[in-house]
Image: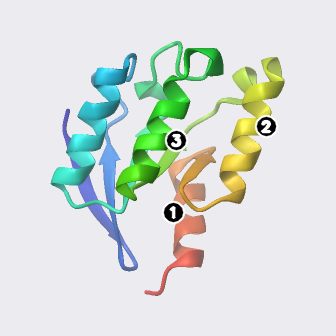
Amino acid sequence: MTADLEIIGSKRIAVCAPQGALLVAERDVNDFMSEAMSLEADWLLLPVSRLGPDFLRLRTRLAGEMAQKCSTYRIGLAVVGDISEAVAASDALRDFVRESNRGTQVWFADDEAAFRKRLEDQVPA
């Protein structure tokens, strides 16, 4: 997996390309985290297109595992893209997304522009 490094204010963002290996299992969580850590990133921007089919099914615990790893290593996670269908189909996911977006560690954004705006609003230039 290869991510590009971008700087927003004082934050280093590991931006994953929309195409590439999917996050489908716990070992993949480690691969994505390793990439972010190798770039000394403050945030990992993960497009929805890189999520395996079970990521948004909370019973699989994959999303929780990714969130926990990010928290442990103090790397923010931005899941970017339209997940409205999955949110509409799951009260648990809707609650997870809402609570995550209230915090500072895991955010769900409709697009990269929304993530960048939110981050820019929080960090000094």
Q: Position of residue 30 (x, y in %)?
A: 28, 33
Horizontal relation, residue 80 to residue 43: left or right: right
- The mark nearer the N terminus, 1 or 3, is 3
Q: Give the residue pinned by disc 1.
A: 116
x, y percent for residue 94: 78, 33
**Secondary-structure class at tag 2:** helix
43 with respect to 57 (left or right): left
Q: Nearer the viewer, residue 106 or 85?
A: 106
Image quadrant occupied by the N terminus: top left
- Nearest to N terminus: mark 3 or mark 2: 3
What residue do we see at 16% from left, 52% from top?
38
Snapshot quadrant of residue 85 = top right
* Label 2 or label 1, whichever comes before in sequence order: 2
Image height of 78 relative to 123, above or below: above
Q: The residue tagged with tag 1: helix, strand or loop?
A: helix
- Considering only vertical position in the picture, is 85 above or below 40? above
Spot occupied by residue 13 in the image (x, y as percentages of width and height): 34, 59
Q: Dot 1 surroundings within 10 Å: few (below 14), some, or many (20 or more)?
A: some
Residue 14 to residue 62: above or below: below
The answer to whether residue 19 shows anywhere in this view is no
Is 25 left or right of 5, judged from the image as shown? right
Q: Position of residue 108 (x, y in %)?
A: 61, 45
Question: Which residue does the image show at 83% across and 25% down from the upper left?
Answer: 91
Q: Amino acid at mark 2?
A: Asp
Q: What residue is pinned by disc 2? A: 95
Between the residue at mark 3 and the residue at mark 2, the CA separation in whole angstroms equals: 15 Å
Secondary structure under tag 3 reads strand
Q: Is label 2 or label 1 in front?
A: 2
Q: Which mark is residue 79?
A: 3
**Residue 52: numbered disc:** none
Quarter of the image for the C terminus: give it.
Answer: bottom left
Q: Residue at x 36, y 79 (%)?
A: 10
